[in-house]
Amino acid sequence: MAVEVLFIPSCGIEPTDKLSPQDTLLRLFHGLCLWKSDAYRMILVTGGLSYSPFVQTKPASHLMRDWLISRGVNPDCILVEDKSVDTFESIKYGLQALHQRMTMDILGEQVELPVDITVVTHRQHARRYWVSFKLGYGISVQLASLDYGIPPATALEEWLCLAYHLFDPQGKGPLARHNRTYLKQLAASP
């Protein structure tokens, strides 16, 4: 039997170290409602530092974890991935964190418990997650998509990113690497 995991990626952070009510908080509220259904055993929150220090001094996933704990979620049920700055790294490092948590020593042998992942994010962003999990890692995930409003420019950007994910599902190409370098430099700038 697989362990049911809610996978909640971060998005917007507002000055200073506040979860954006336009996206990140909406994902958390939806994730919390799903959690309360008792169908899930673990919540994985993802997100590192991707904004300037004037906006963000703590990894987004730490802020998300604290929000969930303040609403009654047992800290032992929350797994935190705090290195990612984009969707590609969110998946990569999130899977590494899951692997670490789900690998157990049983009678001297390392056994990894199977997981079923449900991604909680905006519907257009969810498509990118589905593509990268499936094409990049061979993993089928469930989607708990939200349909909150996004500006037209963001919608267009999401479609372009989806096309990019089809060709580079693990984010190893030059465009993805350049974007990550930029975000990490932004987060490190004074």
Image (tube, rainbow, N blue to C red):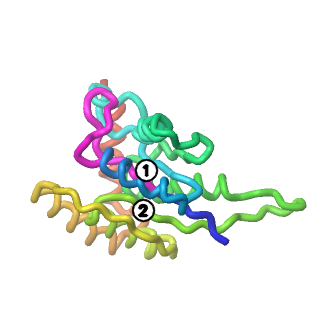
In the shown orientation, is residue 188 left or right of residue 162?
right
In the shown orientation, is residue 66 left or right of residue 54?
right
Residue 20 within the magenta-colored segment of the rendering = yes
Give the percent coordinates (x, y) of residue 45: 47, 48
In the shown orientation, is residue 93 left or right of residue 189?
right
Residue 157 within the magenta-colored segment of the rendering = no
Q: Nearer the viewer, mark 1 or mark 2?
A: 1
Please give the name of the residue rendered at 59% of the width and 47% of the height, measured from the top-left corner: 77
As helix, strand or loop, the secondary structure at mark 2 comes to strand
Q: Quadrant of residue 147?
A: bottom left
The alpha-carbon separation of the residues under discs 1 and 2 comes to: 13 Å
Please determine whether, in this image, residue 74 is positioned above or below residue 88. Answer: above
Dot 1 or dot 2, earlier in sequence: 1
Please give the name of the residue rendered at 30% of the width and 49% of the height, measured from the top-left corner: 26
Q: Which residues are magenta?
A: 7-23
Please determine whether, in this image, residue 26 is positioned above or below residue 16. Answer: below
Please give the name of the residue rendered at 46% of the width and 59% of the height, measured from the top-left corner: 91
| Residue type, mark 2 in image | Val
Give the percent coordinates (x, y) of residue 99: 63, 58
Pointers 1 and 2 in contact (CB under 8 A)? no
Q: Nearer the viewer, residue 147 or 103?
A: 147
Q: Which mark is residue 119?
A: 2
- Which quadrant is the N terminus positioned in? bottom right
Please determine whether, in this image, residue 57 is positioned above or below residue 29. Answer: above
Q: Quadrant of residue 19?
A: top left
Give the percent coordinates (x, y) of residue 60: 40, 39
| Residue type, mark 1 in image | Leu
As helix, strand or loop, the secondary structure at mark 1 comes to helix
